[in-house]
Image: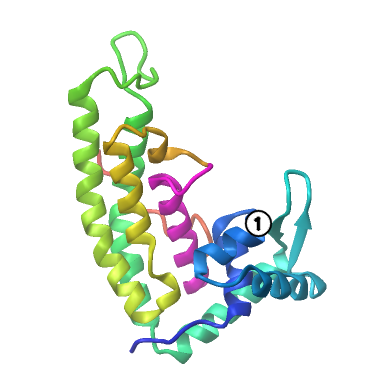
Amino acid sequence: MSGGASDPALLSLHGVRVLGAPSTAQVADRFGLRAAVVAEHLLDAQAYGWVRRHEFFGETWSMTERGRAENERQLAAELDAVGGRAAVAEAHRLFLSLNGPHGVACTNWQVRPTRWDRLAANDHTDADWDVAVLLELERLDNALQQVDALLSGALPRMKGYGRLHREALHRVRLGGHEWLDGPDRASCQLVWIQLHEDLLATLGIARGTDEQPVSR
């Protein structure tokens, strides 16, 4: 069963958790909302003690423990209301089969062992090494599109992770190495982390309890 658009109040609160210390504008951009609407809902959430506002590096928001609990309550109610729990659980299962290999690929982009240093930074001078990493990431990206299709069919608010990951990977292929793991943009690694957090929050799973061993 496919659900409709999520409540903007839910999206505003959830955006703080998934994006990690975002600005109002970043939450609005992620979910296609007007910044004024997000600002109003975040101020309400602040009054309830669900989020905190910070001004150290410009306006950003963080979530409190009370906010995490409320966010998960809202997400569970939404998921059950649209009958999407089975689809999201299946998407989570598929995601976990990709999660370990994606982490290995990202590490291999950052590190290229040598005879003298097994943790040597990858200077991207070995074209064969980088091509092998990119081929693996392309394989994982193709599989991620199936996860994205399952999620967007159940909850439209979860649509877009596949597109964002693919766009970032395309930029990496064009030479923008920072789009693989840059923390200051929608890089492959950051989008992947955000999707994982979204799945955990939506299904009410504690972080670290769903990890699978990585085959090497």
Up the image or down, 163 lies above or below 202; here it is above
| Res 170 quadrant in image | top left
Residue located at (21% from left, 42% from top): 136
Point out residue 210 in the picture as x, y percentages from the top left corner: 42, 59
Residue located at (46% from left, 52% from top): 193
Q: Magenta: predominant secondary structure element? A: helix
Q: Give the side of residue 169 with respect to residue 129, left or right.
A: right
Quick one: quadrant of the C terminus?
top left
Q: Amino acid at mark 1?
A: Ser
189 in magenta: yes
Element type where label 1 sits in the image = loop
Q: Nearer the viewer, residue 31 or 115?
A: 31
Q: Which residue is mark 1?
A: 23
Q: Give the side of residue 4 with respect to residue 53, left or right.
A: left
Q: Which residues are magenta?
A: 184-205
Residue 214 visible to the viewer: no
Residue 57 visible to the viewer: yes
